[in-house]
Amino acid sequence: MNQMTSPSTLPHAPASRKQAASVEFRNVTKRYGIVTAVSDVSFTIEPGQLVTLLGPSGCGKTTTLRMIAGLEMVSEGQILIGGKDVTHLSAADRDVSMVFQSYALFPHMSVLENVAYGPSVQGIPKKEAYAMAMEKLSLVGLNGLEKRAPSELSGGQQQRVAVARALVLEPQVLLFDEPLSNLDAKLRRRVREDIRELQQSLNLTVAYVTHDQEEALAVSDRIIVMSNARIAQTGTPRELYEEPADLFVADFIGDANILSGELVSVTGPLALVQTGGASLHLPHRGMRPGPVKLAVRPDAILIDEATSSSGAVAGRVRKASYLGTQIEYEVESPVGDLFVVQYGRKEPIAPGAQVSLAFAEGRGVAIIPSA
């Protein structure tokens, strides 16, 4: 097979033979000398969930993943897998497998030998180890490629070999460290769909590290956003996108326009907020009357060439970019320079045109809590 199998044609995955296990961090800290890489982090990954550790470089996400694996030992706190305290266990004594960013395949071994390596070093007879490896290669859609060398495979196929090798011993927890970073954009999208389908069909507990927000939103049951060695926010992809906890999360999860506004009054769960002449009714999120910040997603700004719309904000198009499925605008306005995305339009509004801007209250606009 010279081309990747599409997600819809992946072989049907059998039920996992092991019960999925939870992963729990209790006030975990990791220090390297005077540098704190992870500070007082607590979270739980429920059995059978895919949870992504997301954040910029240096935030502590990879160190956290390596502590789950036992490749780094904690300075303080506890780690539990399946309810068992594994804090002081070595990597070899934890029922965990990891798929590395580089795939770490042995170049001198065939695909089959790479996948069978784990069972072989555990003393499983060669014939049985090869049978286990063939089962997992079939699971990831690589039948017929078992005799090839890793160098004879595409990047996506090498990634699948790495997954098959991690799955062959049926670990309680599967870890991914930036698994798609070596693939081009189109292949990343296809392979992440494969990983998600495999995780769900096998009911695997997965911890997944990435700095790619779109990737995290696409594959995750829950996302843990990390910043400066701490957890900034934990939630579902929708919660993080629509209800960011602070300015960092709002700006990091997708694109957001951060605007200044005035919270005028609160009635029940909603607050009346004014910004640039527009009035919005939004969930108050515990905020009281006074100055506030708003996170406004680019597609939640409605742009119109009619400039007399009541309650709209006036603006002037500075730049328009046609991207096929969407048009992106940079718009000058009284509330600041705005990034606006418009779908379903073939011809962009010309730069220099005067426009009116309205905000979609039902989605993509949120008050940012001050603390």
Image (tube, rainbow, N blue to C red):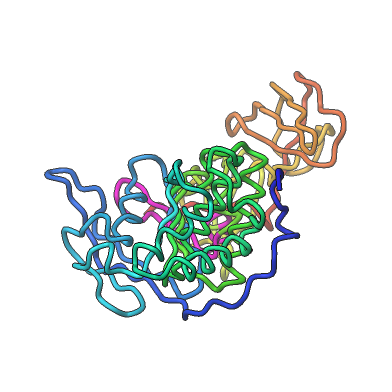
250 part of magenta stretch: no
**Image quadrant in which the C terminus is located:** bottom left
Residue 145 drawn at (x, y percent): 63, 51
Residue 285 drawn at (x, y percent): 49, 62
Residue at the limit of the structure toward the top, as seen here: 352
Nearest the eye: 55 or 369 = 55
Nearest the eye: 127 or 14 = 127
Residue 295 visible here = no
Nearest the eye: 339 or 46 = 46
Residue at the limit of the structure toward the right, as seen here: 346
Residue 285 visible here = yes
Residue 32 appears left or right of 160:
left
Residue in view at x 59 percent, y 69 percent: 200
Residue in view at x 67 percent, y 40 percent: 186
Residue in view at x 47 percent, y 57 percent: 52
Residue in view at x 77 percent, y 28 percent: 322
* Picture layout, residue 15 above or below residue 329: below
Quadrant of res 98: bottom left
232 part of magenta stretch: yes
Residue 251 appears left or right of 335:
left
* Picture layout, residue 252 above or below residue 315: below
Q: What stretch is highlighted in magenta?
A: 220-242
Residue 137 drawn at (x, y percent): 59, 60
Total number of numbered discs in the rendering: 0
Residue 80 drawn at (x, y percent): 30, 73
Nearest the eye: 187 or 130 = 130
Quadrant of res 29: bottom left
* Picture layout, residue 346 above or below residue 317: below
* Picture layout, residue 189 above or below residue 328: below
